[in-house]
Amino acid sequence: MTITKTFSAVIIDHEKLSDINKVIFKYAESARESSSYIIFNVKPINLTDITNDLTFFKLSAENEKKLNNKLKELIDELNSLNTDYGIRDEETKEILSTIKAVGAWNIKFDNIKIIPKGTYAKIDSLKNIKTELGYSIGYKPPFRPIESKEIENINIKDEIIYIFSRTKENQLKLKDSLSEKIMEINPDFILEYETFL
């Protein structure tokens, strides 16, 4: 009897996306690429703004031991790429990951009457950082008010910057560094931090 399990891989380092998927496709019976944006956010979206950073895949083997060995070989090969990723067993929800800390800054516009020109470009530049402390990832919301115009009575979605790090200590350092950079853009932003892992 063949055993099959479904996993999802979160690919944090977009530069290694193709290399990681090559390894996954080598071991998987079937695989499908997707985007965390589509799963966690509301449509409509501009497809040119998103990256496929999730891969759902199935591993099969004759028994549990062989399936675990196949998963271990896959993880060993991914680790040899020297990059960050997360794999989740979709049944047990167990996470096997180089990333040990995940959080997000929510940037709120509640205290702002006019969004200065260039604000969005500065926020977007903070959504794609790769440092020794970790990564930041973010997407453009489906709607943004026009810069340099009054935004009173407009419901503005938070801008969200996700943070991925290998340690809690690195996460805190990256969190503080991003907080300073965000407040340099506009000291009237309201920031709320959320920890996921």
Image (spheres, rainbow, N blue to C red):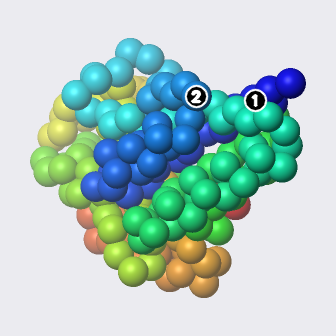
What element does badge 2 sit on?
Answer: loop
Q: Residue at x 26, y 51 (%)?
A: 124
Q: Position of residue 189 (x, y in %)?
A: 41, 57
Q: Position of residue 102 (x, y in %)?
A: 60, 61
Q: Hey, which quadrant is residue 103 in on the image?
A: bottom right
**Residue 4 marker:** 1
**Nearer the observer, 167 or 94:** 94
Compute the Cα span from label 2 to label 1: 9 Å
Question: What amino acid is labelled 1 in the image?
Answer: Thr
Q: Position of residue 86 (x, y in %)?
A: 58, 54
Mark 1 crowd level (few <14, some 14–19, many ≥20, 10 Å Cα): some
Mark 2 crowd level (few <14, some 14–19, many ≥20, 10 Å Cα): some
Q: Residue at x 67, y 50 (%)?
A: 71
What element does badge 1 sit on?
Answer: strand
Residue position for label 2: 29
Quarter in which the C terminus is drawn: bottom right
Q: Residue at x 85, y 43 (%)?
A: 64
Quarter in which the N terminus is drawn: top right
**Residue 21 marker:** none
**Nearer the observer, 158 or 86:** 86
First-in-chain label (2 vs 1) = 1
Asked whether residue 87 is in view, the answer is: yes
Figure check: 40 above or below 170: above
